[in-house]
Image (spheres, rainbow, N blue to C red):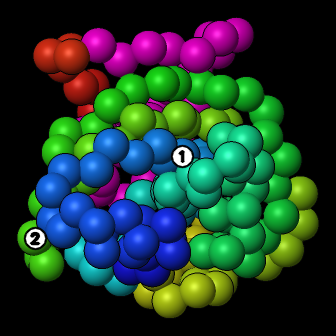
Amino acid sequence: MAIPDFVVALREKIGTAPLWLSGVTAVVVKEDQLLLVRRADDGAWTPVTGIIDPGEHPADAAVREVAEEAGVRVVPERLAQVGVTERVVYPNGDESQYLDLTFLMRWADGEPYPADGENTHVAWFAMDALPSMSPEMNARIEAALSDRPSAAFRFAGEPLEG
């Protein structure tokens, strides 16, 4: 996975110690289809995810991540969920935990393809024929596709649906 330059610089100073980072999840919809990527690192199908750069607005980060990873242009519709991930320990020993901002995004144009090497596949899926995903990713998608007019807030210890 591509590591942002600012994270590389931080890692030079703190080594593998836990980092608290802000991230986005982009749940991209085109009519009755959902855009998913298959991650190169673990083979999991997920919505597009990524780290927010310093000073970057979260919705802009979601738009950028979709363009970088899937090669399509999208428009943010709404912030759907705010949550915190479990601590992640990467194979090299780096530890991170993420504040995740999940956005509902509307496809604007472009044909999806694995644009940056972070994913092996990019595809549209019918809403009723999604591939198997983690409970965490299912919860993010469910929040984005809900009819809620405002963001849902996940609380520590709250069970995941899906």
* Magenta stretch contains residue 138: yes
Up the image or down, 127 lies above or below 82; here it is below
Q: Amino acid at mark 1?
A: Val
Residue 33, visible in the rendered structure: no
* 22 or 36: nearer the viewer: 22
**Tag on residue 107?**
none
Name the side, left or right, on which 57 lies relative to 115. Answer: right
Name the side, left or right, on which 65 lies relative to 90. Answer: right
Residue beneath disc 1: 24
Q: Position of residue 83 (x, y in %)?
A: 39, 27
Up the image or down, 75 lies above or below 158; here it is below
For disc 2, the neighbor class at 10 Å (few under 14, some 14 to 19, many from 20) is few
Q: Position of residue 27 (x, y in %)?
A: 60, 46
Residue stretch rendered in magenta on the structure: 126-155
Up the image or down, 160 lies above or below 34; here it is above
Up the image or down, 18 lies above or below 93; here it is above
Name the side, left or right, on which 123 lies relative to 75. Answer: left
